[in-house]
Amino acid sequence: MTHIPLPGDTYASPPFTGSAPFFPSLRFYPQLAGILYREGGKAKTGNYTGGDWAGASLAVLRALEACGVRVEASGMSVLDDPAPCVFVANHMSTLETFVLPCVIQPRKDLTFVVKRSLLTFPGLGPVLSSRRPVAVDRVNPREDLTTVLEEGAKRLAEGTSVIVFPQSTRASGLDLSMFNSIGVKLARRAGVPVVPLALRTDAWGTGALIKDLGRLHPSLPVHFAFGESLAVAGNGKEEHKRVCDFIAGKLQEWGVPQLPA
């Protein structure tokens, strides 16, 4: 992990100097398809590394930036602690699944809690499978909780950090009534800290026919903000509140509404 594509505590996309594509989605998705085809083929060989994943993620970020999407990230110095942790983030779009690896993986070995059906997607499925994700079905919440706690704790014990999206689905705003404490429960069980991660990624829209392939909206800024690492004490209620407060505060700062409970 000597090469860090996005070093330092903050990142901002370089100024956009080209001519903005009239239909950014039509420019971006063929590039994404090419990246997935190439990386999926690599992953099927069984020799896909964390560096490969970070490089593919960086290629997606650059493709988005070439279409006019601007990204800002802050608080990245928390990633310099090599110990594993649980990242707890709101879930707004497909963008975070593709771009977060190039931010985090070069500094901390990483995997996601993902919906099992994603592992069947062409290209993306083999790549995600190679990173040993914690796969849930989202049919039985009790079974999913058990899977996350047991499998997530195994990954953390092996030194791999885990990203948890407590919301059951992607949402344009933050509904705290749907933001459960599964990430804090996992961190407490594994004896690792929890790191809040606030995301604004609605520049990648939700598709009408294929949910993951929505229109790009380059006029909307993309924000990633990492909070401070929190050691979980007692029942974790205070830490869960601090995670929620951090994410809600950042979304408010970025002009994203909190959805009514």
Image: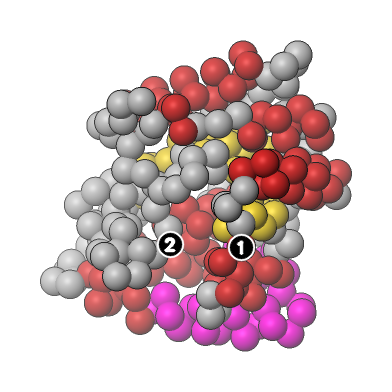
The main secondary structure of the magenta stretch is helix
Task: Answer whether residue 62 is visible to the viewer in this image.
Answer: no
Using the image as rendered, state which of residue 227 and residue 40 is in the foreground: 40
Task: Answer whether residue 137 is visible to the viewer in this image.
Answer: yes
- Identify the residue at image location x=55%, y=84%: 38
Crowd tier of the residue under label 1, counting other residues whose Cα lies within 10 Å: few below 14, some 14–19, many 20 or above: some
Mark 2 residue type: Leu
Magenta stretch bounds: 31-54
Mark 2 or 1, closer to the camera:
1
Say the numbered circle drawn on residue 61. Answer: 2
Q: Quadrant of residue 63?
A: bottom left
Taking the view exactly as shown, the residue that stands out farthest to the left is 22
- Identify the residue at image location x=18%, y=67%: 20
Say the numbered circle drawn on residue 116. Answer: 1
- Identify the residue at image location x=70%, y=30%: 185
- Identify the residue at image location x=49%, y=40%: 167
Q: Quadrant of the C terminus?
A: top left
Residue 152 in magenta? no
Q: Quadrant of residue 200?
A: top left
Mark 1 residue type: Arg
Q: Position of residue 61 (x, y in %)?
A: 43, 62
- Indicate whether 180 appears above or below 112: above
Using the image as rendered, state which of residue 184 and residue 218 is in the foreground: 184
Using the image as rendered, state which of residue 148 and residue 110 is in the foreground: 148
- Dot 1: element: helix
- Dot 2: element: helix
Q: Quadrant of the N terminus?
A: bottom right
- Indicate whether 202 appears above or below 132: above
